[in-house]
Image (cartoon, grey):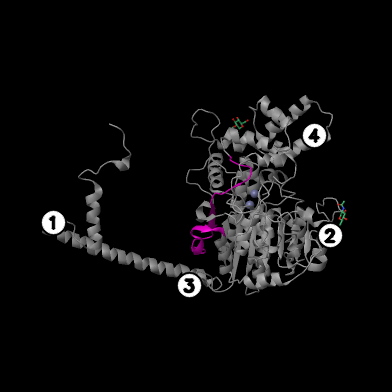
Amino acid sequence: MVDQPLLARPNSPNSSANDIEEEDALLTGQPTNRQPTQYKKWREIGIFVWALLATIAVVILAVVYQHETSLSRSRHRTGGWGPDGKPTGKRNMIFMVSDGMGPTSLAMTREWRQWTSGLPVDDILVLDQHHIGQSRTRSTSSLITDSAAGATAFSCGFKSYNGAISVLPDHTPCGTVLEAAKRAGYMTGLVVTTRITDATPACFAAHANRREYEDLIAEQLIGNYPLGRVVDLIIGGGRCHFLPNTTEGSCRADSTDVVAMAKDKFDFSYIDNKEDFDNLDAKGGVKLPLLALLASGDIPYEIDRVHVSDVYPSQSEMAEVALKALSAATKDSDKGFFLMIEGSRIDHAGHGNDPAAQVHEVMAHDKAFSAVLKHLEEDSVEGVLVSTSDHETGGLAAARQLHQAYPMYRWFPGVLSNATHSGEYLSGQWRQFLDSSSTSSRKDKQDKATELISSGLGIKDYTQEEVDSIVDAQPIWPPSYLFADMVSRRAQIGWSTHGHSAADVNIYASSPDHAPGLVGNHENIEVGQFIAEYLDLDLKPITEELKSKKVKTSSVVGQEGEAWGEWMGPPGLALNDNGKLAQVDEYHGDFKHRKREAESDCGCGMKH
Ligand SMILES: *[C@@H]1O[C@H](CO)[C@@H](O)[C@H](O)[C@H]1NC(C)=O
Ligand SMILES: *[C@@H]1O[C@H](CO)[C@@H](O)[C@H](O)[C@H]1NC(C)=O
Ligand SMILES: [Zn+2]
Ligand SMILES: [Zn+2]
């Protein structure tokens, strides 16, 4: 006889179906269709009465207990929670973005952590314990969103095109939750591990027709735009966009000194290194507004940062400083704060198809999430933490078929543990080696590549072919990809793209009760709408104000003209690969197109 799954077996006459019928009868008081004897009948009535009394007792106890806990909670907190699911008084909102983190990033990181630390299968991440829903991420221009359109959904509560920094498809600006929060009397903050001018943070306090206008965005973030200064605390990387092009370490196209502008015109205190960051607290608390630009570009991946933790702070260190500073600054206010914290580089590890870098980025985000939770628990002000992703990156799979033979059902977390550096870091070391030893022979190069593979990735079974692929690498498929791929293949981790994917992403919250509107499956714009509702914000007047002001910034990006949108940079209409105006993409009949573009070195292949 063929084995049948357990559940498909036909019921035997003595199966539990009859028991269930009986149980049902006990609970509802309705007789079953069998005729009970007199004794049985009285016994059933007895059991029924007992069950009823027990149930009533349990309900009463539960209500009393619930009442007690909510009393003790509200005793040391401001206001408590109203019937609309929001605190009645002062409140804080911490919104976290895990850029590019899809559901598989969580599974991979959880399993890797269990394996590495010898933890049981039910040991899960803090994020896992706070999962409440999912977000659908498409933009107006594509089924696959980018971080700009993704963050515009969070900041404005509207869908827009890929590349839009809080502007709508008609190139009008949309007021953001941060701007509205500032106007309503909240304090505001942005904390990221990438450039503060990158798409996610930019969308909360800047408006630009294209995400590439990072010089323009830098000026807007500190207040040089129609609304004036709206951010009280900025911690992250991207310093090079704030320094004039006459200075070493600048990546600005013009000679505007945005740091000087921040200090002189907008009263920011400015720090640019870890030592000053560590001392922020020392002199009687953090002085706001604060501009802390702690890296020229991105803060290094966590897997690399731990080796230079005296130079760069971690995501949770930055989050803790921000929470403390904003709490202190709003201590005597009847309004709390809005803080956005981004685990920015989960996305970059996805773009790099680098699983070792990614698990450390996800752990860093989990740790920061945990730090925020702890703050909320200890704080006397009511607050909510919501964390979600803008999209998935990499098309990550915790599985990989490497050969024609049917694959084993396995992936190998240990391979990720043996890597002590990211592909990006090793690629940087490789570049340095090439720059500093222009006369090196092929053998020298092979030796260097071998050393990097062995010491940085912990891989000893490298092949000659793999070593040569690094020696012969071309810009279109850089060494960073090759290093990371050596790890992915050995770990049997799969990737379907170096870009983003259309997967739904997870939503997390301090409690489902704190964000009932986000439980279940939602459009990404509902996340933005939730933030506005929770803080009682009206974004429309902000939008009107932005539209009404024909203010020009000092940036040279915009051309001369009268259009009110000029301060957001030229519209630069979003285009498809084939040059058509962006609508939802159609298949262009040319799947090699992007390759030609990349070969022509237009630099347009690396959008995050
Ligand atoms: C620096 O910026 C100014 C405009 O502000 C520009 O004229 C000049 O060419 C720039 N210099 C460099 C080296 O890019
Ligand atoms: C990790 O490195 C150790 C030491 O080189 C080695 O014995 C082990 O096999 C490696 N593990 C994996 C999964 O590659
Ligand atoms: Zn993103
Ligand atoms: Zn990205």
Q: Give percent across and percent down for residue 309.
A: 71, 48
Tell me, yes or no, whether the two marked residues, 2 and 1, touch with CB atoms within 8 Å.
no
Q: Residues within 10 Å of mark 1 (few under 14, many from 20)?
A: few
Please name the amino acid that badge 2 sits on.
Asp
Quick check: can you spot residue 279?
no
Picture residue at 82% right of the left edge, 54% below the top: 253
Please name the amino acid that badge 1 sits on.
Gln
| Mark 1 vs ligand 2: CB below 8 Å | no
Q: Quadrant of ligand 1?
A: bottom right
Picture quarter with the N terminus: top left
221 sits left or right of 68 in the view: right
For the residues labelled 2 and 1, the Cα–Cα distance comes to 91 Å
Of labels 2 and 4, earlier in sequence is 2
* In front: label 1 or label 4: 4
Tell me, yes or no, whether the two marked residues, 3 and 4, touch with CB atoms within 8 Å.
no
Q: Residues within 10 Å of mark 2 (few under 14, many from 20)?
A: some
Numbered badge on residue 257: 2
Closer-to-camera residue (151/365): 151
Q: Give percent across and percent down for residue 499.
A: 63, 45
Closer-to-camera residue (275/421): 421
Please name the amino acid that badge 4 sits on.
Leu
Picture residue at 85% right of the left edge, 54% below the top: 245
Tag 1's secondary structure?
Answer: loop
Name the residue that disc number 4 marks: 434
Q: Which residues are drawn in magenta? A: 495-524
Of labels 3 and 4, earlier in sequence is 3
Name the residue that disc number 3 marks: 83
Tag 4's secondary structure?
Answer: helix
Tell me, yes or no, whether the two marked residues, 3 and 1, touch with CB atoms within 8 Å.
no
